[in-house]
Image (spheres, rainbow, N blue to C red):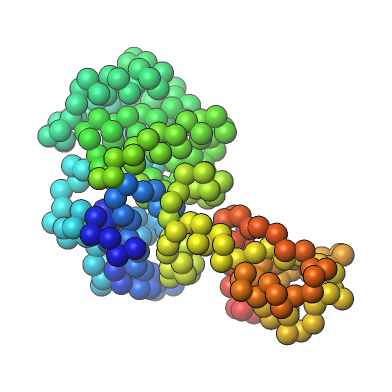
């Protein structure tokens, strides 16, 4: 993704916490696209997002936002959406605007009113009385009302019902119809990414193991299942995250290896969630 219109360019990021290290993390987010940021718990997703937002300092590496060094970039064009908003519980929806609008030169009062109305956010409703979905929506309304060009989302759809998640995914898809805007979307709910993401950055143990088009990742691997008699030791080595169960085995393999298995072995398409599970299982098997 060597694109001159990259919104985010992260290169060789390192952060050492002693027990955990972020090691040479690199990826780009091009304009007009949604990148899903995936990996198991503790893989380094939140640390990476904090580095991009300059909340914590990197040990080495570089981060560019809109072509500028991140530490020189003003956050006017960045909207951050978390699973829980950093707003005072006693604030009303109107209070949120009063509190945050002075920080943004491009704050659009009419746009905020438009989004809160379309989201069903009543001006006098208190933050503590909003549902999880509504709390995410007020953050999105705030981000869009200062004309953010980059949305960074950290687990925003966790715990939401399918309808609320679908509404948020629709918003993100509409947001990136403008090719000057992008989304970096970290979530455990990979089905949302399968519907919305164009690119995937997959991080394991502090290292990016894949960064590229979502379809390329899904096409790179396949799910394999079968009986114990259907594979030999050499074929077993080709299975990532091998797991034996009562009637046989399951795991995944690279699609380039499919022809090396017997026809009786079941080969199926794989999901992003399964890729994470089998990769994580393989890492634990290698640690033994």
* Residue that appears at 12% across and 34% down: 105
Q: Left or right of 20: which side holds 41? A: right
Quarter of the picture containing the N terminus is bottom left
Residue 16 rendering spot, x and y as whole percentages: 35, 72
Q: In the figure, residue 283 lies in which quadrant?
A: bottom right
Q: Nearer the viewer, residue 118 or 268?
A: 268
Residue 31 rendering spot, x and y as whole percentages: 29, 50
* Residue that appears at 73% across and 85% down: 234
Residue 213 rendering spot, x and y as whole percentages: 44, 59
Evaluate whether residue 88 shows in this view.
no
Q: Nearer the viewer, residue 86 or 271?
A: 271
Q: How many marks?
A: 0
- Residue furthest to the bottom in view is 234
Residue 233 rendering spot, x and y as whole percentages: 76, 84
Quarter of the picture containing the C terminus is bottom right
* Residue that appears at 53% across and 48% down: 194
Q: Left or right of 244: which side holds 15? A: left
Q: In the figure, residue 22 lies in which quadrant?
A: bottom left
Q: Nearer the viewer, residue 20 or 170?
A: 170
Q: Left or right of 168: which side holds 277? A: right
* Residue that appears at 34% across and 39% down: 177
Evaluate whether residue 73 shows in this view.
yes
């Amino acid at each position: 993704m060597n694109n001159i219109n990259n919104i985010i360019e992260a290169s060789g990021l390192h952060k050492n916490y002693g027990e955990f290290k972020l090691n040479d993390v690199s990826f780009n987010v091009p304009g007009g696209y949604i990148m899903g940021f995936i990996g198991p718990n503790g893989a380094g997703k939140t640390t990476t997002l904090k580095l991009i937002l300059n909340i914590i300092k990197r040990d080495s590496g570089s981060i560019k936002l809109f072509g500028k060094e991140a530490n020189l970039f003003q956050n006017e064009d960045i909207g951050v959406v978390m699973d829980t908003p950093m707003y005072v519980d006693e604030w009303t929806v109107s209070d949120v605007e009063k509190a945050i609008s002075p920080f943004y030169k491009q704050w659009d009062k009419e746009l905020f009113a438009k989004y809160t109305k379309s989201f069903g956010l009543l001006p006098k409703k208190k933050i503590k009385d909003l549902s999880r979905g509504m709390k995410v929506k007020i953050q999105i309304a705030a981000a869009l009302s200062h004309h953010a060009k980059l949305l960074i989302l950290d687990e925003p759809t966790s715990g939401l019902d399918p309808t609320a998640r679908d509404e948020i995914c629709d918003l993100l898809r509409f947001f990136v119809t403008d090719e000057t805007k992008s989304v970096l979307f970290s979530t455990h709910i990979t089905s949302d990414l399968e519907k919305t993401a164009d690119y995937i950055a997959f991080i394991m143990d502090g290292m990016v193991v894949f960064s590229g088009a979502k379809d390329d990742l899904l096409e790179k691997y396949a799910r394999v299942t079968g009986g114990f008699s259907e594979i030999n030791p050499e074929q077993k080595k080709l299975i990532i995250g091998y797991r034996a169960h009562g009637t046989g085995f399951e795991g995944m393999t690279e699609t380039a290896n499919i022809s090396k298995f017997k026809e009786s072995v079941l080969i199926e398409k794989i999901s992003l969630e399964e890729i994470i599970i089998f990769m994580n299982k393989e890492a634990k098997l290698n640690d033994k």
